[in-house]
Image (tube, helix red, strand yellow):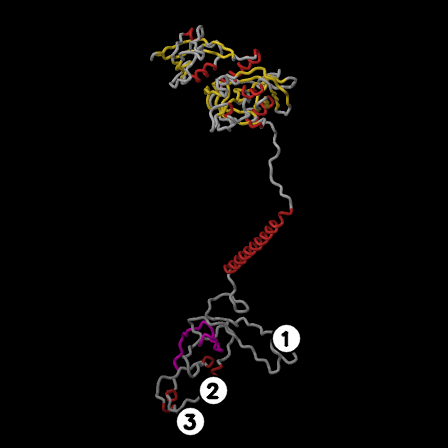
Amino acid sequence: MPDSSADLPSGPPAVPVPEPFAAPASGPPSVPVSEPRPDFPPEPADSRASEPRHPLPSGSAESQAPAPSAAPPRDHHPEPLHAPDPYGTPPYGEPGPWASAPPVQYPEATPARGTQVPGAYSEGQAHDTYAPPVATPWQNYDPWAAPGPLQQTGAAVATTEQRRRRTNRALVSGAVLIALVSGGVGGAVGVYLERNSGESDVELPQAGKEAPRRAPDSVAGIAAQALPSVVTLHVSGSEEEATGTGFVLDGQGHILTNNHVVEPAADSGEITVTFSGGDTAEAEVVGRDSGYDLAVVRVSGVDGLEPLPLGNSDSVQVGDPVVAIGAPFDLANTVTSGIISAKERPITAGGESGDGSDVSYVDALQTDAPINPGNSGGPLLDSRARAIGINSAIRSADSGSGPEGGQSGSIGLGFAIPINQGKRVAEELINTGRATHPVIGVTLDMDYTGDGARVGTESGDGGPAVTAGGPGARAGIEPGDIITEVDGRPVHSGEELIVKTRAHRPGDTLRLTVLRGGTEKLITLVLGSADSN
C-alpha cells in the first residue's frame, strides 16, 4: 500500500490518547478521563480497541489526512461520574457526565461442551422432570421506569395504599358473600317453616283471667248490684198473654210493675215471677191503676228477697247516666245504658178501650237507653244503682206513643214514670188496694185545638163543667176559661194539664194562670182527691 502520509497536509500535532481509552475509528470523540477512582474495580480494556482496523482505501480523506500532532496536556480534565461500560449496555453509547449509568451486568461463562446445565434437559433424564430456568433479577428490567423496589420476577412491589385497597376489596367481597349465604339460608328456613307450620296446633294469645268485680258506678257494677232485685213476669189470661219486668219493693214480696203488664190476668189468670237466679214463684195482683199505669203484685213463700233501693226523681238532671234492666222479647236480665234526655215530658199511653178509662197520663223522664217490648215495668237506675223511674213506654217509628209502641222496637225514645210518683202510688196500692188522683174539679174540652187547656161548658153526662163545691169552683174557675200556665210553666193542651196535675199529690197547692175574655187572671187552688174508680 503506498504511503499516504507524505500527501497529508501539515497541521497541528496530534494529541496522544491513553491506550485504555482509545476511541474506535468511527463514532463520537472520546473524552479524556483521569486516573480510575479507588472505589471502582479495575475495568478490562475496551474490546473494541483490540479489534483489527480495516485499511482505508487510498485516496480517501481520512487516509490523506496528516497525522495529528500531540496536544499539550491539560491541567484539569472533566471526570465522568463512573467508569465506562466495556460491554455497551443500553442506553446506547457510553454514559456521559449528565446521567447515571445503569447497573453493570456481567455475562455468565459459557460451560464447556458436554457440561450439564441446571434446568436443561440431558440424556437419560425423564421428560417429566424438566425444571424451568431460574429467573434472573434483571430479566424484566426497564431502565426508563420510575425507580422502585423490584421482586425476583422483576415486578414492582405493591405499595401500602395498594395493599390496603386489596384488603378492603377482600373484606367487602367477604361481607357480600356472607350476606348472600345468610339470605339464602334464611329464605330456605322460612319456606320450610311455612310449609310445615300446619303440623303443630295453633295457639292464639289471650289475656289472663281478671277479677270479676267492677267499679260500683260502672254499668257492670250497677247491673251486678241491681239484677238480684229485678224479676221477669209471665202473665197469661183468658184471652191474651204478656211478658214484662218488675222489681222487688220489700222483703214481704211486693213487686212494682206496669198496669198494662198484669192487665190480662186482672180478673182471672196466672202470673209467674222468675227471679234473676232462675227461681220462679206464683204471684197475685195487690192493686193496679190504669191512670198511672202502675200495679203491685205479691209473691209468697220466697226467702232471701233483695229489695231495690229507691232514688229521688226530683234530683235527676238532664244528661245523667242511667241503666235500664228488663226482658225485651222475653230475654231476661237484659242491661242497656243511656242518659236522661229530658224531664217532665208529658205523654199519654193506652186508650185501647175507646172510652178513655185506660188512658195513662205520665209526666215522664225521657231516656235514650234502649227500651223494647218486655222492658215495661223494669227499673231505670241512676249511677248508684237506685231506681229513679219505671220504664213504661217508647216512641217507635211506625206507631204513636203507647205502652211499648205495640211491639215495635226502640229508636232511642223511651219514657219512664218518675219514681217519686211510683212510690206514692205503690204505697197506696199496697195499703188500700187503690190509688188516689189529684183533681181540679173541672171538665176540660178535649176538642179544643188552641193553645192552653179550655174548661168545657158542660160535663160528659150533661152536668156543669165546674163541679160545684170542688177545688176549681172554690178557686173561682168558670166555664170557658183557658188555663195557660201551671206554677209558671206553659200548658198547651188538656192532656198536658192533666199530666201536670197528676204529678202532684192530693192537697198540693197550684198557681194557675187563666185567660178569661182576653184578660189574664192568677188563681190559686188546692188539689182535691178522687179514687181511681
Label 2 residue SS: loop
Image mark for residue 52: 2
In which quadrant of the rendered image does the N terminus lie?
Answer: bottom left
Residue underneath mark 3: 1
Amino acid bearing label 3: Met
Label 3 residue SS: loop
Amino acid bearing label 2: Pro
Quadrant in the picture for residue 298: top right
* Label 2 packing within 10 angstroms: few (<14), some (14-19), many (20+): few
Residue underneath mark 1: 128
Alpha-carbon span between mark 2 and mark 3: 17 Å
Alpha-carbon span between mark 1 and mark 3: 64 Å
Q: Farthest bottom residue? A: 2
* For marks 2 and 1 on the same chain, the one whose residue lies earlier in the sequence: 2
**Quick check: is 87 in the magenta stretch?**
yes
- x and y, in percent, of residue 500 in the image: 45, 15
Alpha-carbon span between mark 2 and mark 1: 49 Å
Nearer to us in this view, 49 or 461:
461
Most common secondary structure along the magenta stretch: loop
**Quick check: is 523 in the magenta stretch?**
no
Instruction: Mark 1 and mark 3 in contact? Answer it, CB < 8 Å.
Output: no
Write down the region rendered in magenta.
69-92
Label 1 residue SS: helix
Q: Is residue 12 above or below residue 280?
A: below
Amino acid bearing label 1: Asp
Going 54% across and 67% down the picture, which residue do you hit?
Answer: 151
